[in-house]
Amino acid sequence: MECKKIKNLSACNCSYEPCSRKGTCCDCLKYHLPNRELPACCFPDNTERTYDRSFEKFAELVTKGRI
């Protein structure tokens, strides 16, 4: 499968500047899922910047209707 890194970067809201996985979604998922986290793109910008990307935070936002 061809990586569409350049296209993916336009939708990547990761605010962690030294992140080497930006735009490489498969690497990002591979990194976050074992830590019970989701990638930045699953969260609104104001939540993403807190770096709490846990499953629990995502569920909280869904329950409150913020996602």
Image: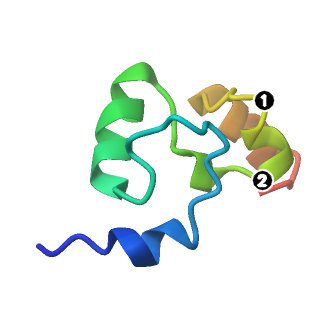
Q: Quadrant of residue 12?
A: bottom right
The extreme left residue here reads 1
Residue 38 located left or right of residue 23: right
Which color mode does the image show? rainbow
Task: Please identify the residue farthest to the front as the structure is shown.
Answer: 18
The amino acid beneath tag 2 is Pro
Residue 23, percent from left and from top: 42, 60
Query: Along the line of sight, which residue is nearer the eye, 29 or 2?
Result: 2
Q: Is residue 18 above or below residue 45?
A: above
Mark 2 highlights which residue? 44
The residue positioned 77% from the left and 57% from the top of the image is 67
Whole-number angstrom distance, CA of label 2 to CA of label 1: 10 Å
At numbered mark 2, what does the secondary structure look like: helix, strand or loop? Answer: loop
What's the amino acid at mark 1? Thr
Residue indicated by mark 1: 50
Q: Residue at x 39, y 41 (%)?
A: 20
- On screen, residue 44 above or below 35: below
How far across and down, in percent of the image, does residue 44 sit? 77, 53
Q: Where is residue 3 shown, x and y percent of the image?
A: 23, 70
User: Which residue sits at x=52%, y=44%?
Assistant: 39
The x, y position of residue 6, in whole percent, is 40, 74
Q: Residue at x 48, y 38 (%)?
A: 19
